């Protein structure tokens, strides 16, 4: 790994040296800027309506020149030269502009709520996240998962082999036997199964560890990888990654491999957590912050609402109970969070990773499309209680009790409340959210 450069979400970079000290732009060398621009142009999407230029926007500003702005996706990009660009989320934590350690800790804590990190607790003290870039942190997380596998014991399996043996074992391969043993009548060309550790899952884990050993700059990570590789001495390096992935068999007995294989797919095939994939101009581990924020809030709403209600509030994430149209059943509705509690209306909560503002005449920056979506949720779930959850930032401090009411005189009105989640104090925010929903009778 080479040099690294840290920016925040929504930052704009330029290669114009005249703006190297500008508060509005981040400056990088023209060589790396051009590499990044080429990387963005070669990125492709697996989804028809997705455009990488919405998330890493190439632009031009008069007197400044070419620019690139990062939107909504965070993580790390490694360019062909080895230069790394670390993109952190835009979170107000009261830290200095150039002090990224607290933001990184909060972001990693949020990542642990994604399904790819499910059940993984980050030990920030051991990770030294303020000294490691994100790629090194992810390498360390893979090491932790591999260590857990070795602790429980790497699994053996029946592997199909073919060999010219001096004894009869398994199934005779007649055509190969005739070809190989015209002279050696004492031999048998056999196909047989052997119970051994050299199975596809172990080959992929070992191959991933060897790749990570080459690219890590952390002496701690490198040391732990060397120790782990001792447990895989009897395992071959994967010669055909695609074939080995096709042979992976995950079940109850191989549960310890599940996360390792997911991450092996990412590391070995240079995949990412977005809908986008690169070609030859560098690699990336990028995370859509909309999904990260949604998973993070859903996890803590589930936990805190259950605690506050003695498990009477049943919270589901990505609820799939209704379609926008019933005949035919099309356009499934998927509110981020649905809370159901006896004797209370259904509560719909939807997270939006967007920075609102204080301009009431511009609807505080709330999207009209989002409001249409909330209206559909209200009608289909037969509830008036809709909550939009946005990240808190200093500009909206004191902006409380925003709500929008439709059909006031009808039996079922639509009441959309706006609430902010302070990521520096998220537990208290969600306790207060529970109180506002279930204990403030005036709001129901």
Image: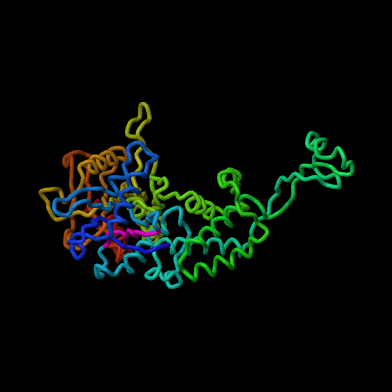
Residue furthest to the bottom in view is 125
Direction from residue 37 to residue 63 in the image, left or right = left
Residue 285 horizontal/vertical position (percent): 40, 54
Nearer the observer, 296 or 56: 56
Figure quadrant of the N terminus: bottom left
Examine the structure image and report whether residue 257 is included in the region drawn in magenta: no
Q: Residue at x 80, y 45 (%)?
A: 164
Residue furthest to the right in view is 186
Residue 50 horizontal/vertical position (percent): 33, 40
Residue 348 horizontal/vertical position (percent): 31, 47
Nearer the observer, 119 or 202: 202
Nearer the observer, 391 or 408: 391
Residue 351 horizontal/vertical position (percent): 30, 51
Q: Residue at x 62, y 49 (%)?
A: 200
User: Which stretch is magenta?
Assistant: 82-91
Q: Which colour style is shown?
A: rainbow
Residue furthest to the top in view is 327
Nearer the observer, 283 or 74: 283
**Rendered image quadrant of residue 4:** bottom left
User: Can residue 261 be seen by looking at this rendering?
Assistant: yes
**Rendered image quadrant of residue 209:** bottom right
Direction from residue 360 to residue 275 in the image, left or right = right
Q: Is residue 61 above or below residue 328?
A: below
């Amino acid at each position: 790994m080479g040099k690294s450069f840290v920016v925040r979400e929504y930052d704009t970079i330029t290669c114009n040296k005249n703006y190297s000290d500008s508060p509005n732009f981040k400056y990088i060398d023209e060589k790396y800027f051009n590499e990044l621009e080429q990387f963005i142009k070669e990125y492709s999407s697996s989804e028809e309506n997705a455009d990488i230029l919405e998330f890493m926007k190439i632009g031009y500003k008069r007197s400044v020149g070419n620019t690139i702005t990062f939107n909504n996706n965070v993580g790390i990009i490694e360019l062909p030269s080895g230069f790394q660009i670390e993109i952190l989320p835009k979170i107000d934590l009261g830290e200095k502009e150039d002090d990224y350690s607290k933001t990184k800790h909060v972001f990693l804590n949020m990542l642990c709520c994604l399904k790819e990190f499910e059940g993984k607790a980050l030990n920030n003290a051991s990770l030294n996240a303020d000294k490691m870039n994100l790629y090194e942190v992810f390498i360390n997380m893979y090491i932790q998962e591999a260590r857990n596998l070795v602790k429980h014991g790497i699994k053996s399996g029946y592997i199909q082999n073919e060999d010219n043996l001096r004894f009869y074992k398994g199934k005779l391969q007649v055509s190969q036997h005739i070809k190989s043993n015209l002279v050696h009548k004492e031999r048998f060309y056999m196909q047989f199964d052997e119970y051994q550790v050299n199975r596809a899952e172990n080959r992929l884990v070992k191959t991933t560890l060897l790749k990570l050993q080459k690219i890590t700059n952390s002496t701690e990570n490198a040391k732990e990888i060397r120790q782990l590789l001792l447990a895989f001495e009897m395992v071959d390096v994967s010669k055909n990654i695609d074939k080995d992935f096709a042979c992976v068999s995950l079940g109850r007995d191989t549960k310890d491999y599940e996360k390792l294989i997911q991450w092996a797919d990412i590391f070995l095939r240079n995949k990412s957590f977005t809908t986008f994939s690169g070609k030859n101009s560098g690699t990336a581990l990028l995370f859509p912050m909309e999904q990260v924020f949604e998973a993070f809030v859903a996890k803590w709403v589930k936990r805190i609402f259950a605690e506050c209600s003695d498990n009477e509030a049943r919270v589901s994430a990505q609820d799939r109970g209704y379609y926008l149209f019933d005949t035919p059943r099309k356009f499934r509705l998927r509110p981020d969070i649905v809370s159901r509690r006896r004797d209370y209306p259904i509560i719909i909560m939807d997270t939006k990773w967007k920075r609102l503002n204080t301009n009431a005449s511009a609807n505080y920056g709330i999207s009209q499309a989002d409001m249409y979506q909330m209206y559909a949720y209200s009608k289909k779930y037969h509830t008036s209680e809709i909550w939009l959850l946005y990240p808190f930032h200093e500009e909206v401090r004191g902006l409380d009790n925003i709500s929008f009411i439709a059909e006031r005189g009808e039996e079922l009105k639509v009441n959309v409340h706006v609430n902010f989640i302070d990521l520096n104090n998220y537990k208290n925010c969600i306790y207060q959210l529970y109180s506002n929903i279930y204990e403030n009778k005036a709001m129901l």
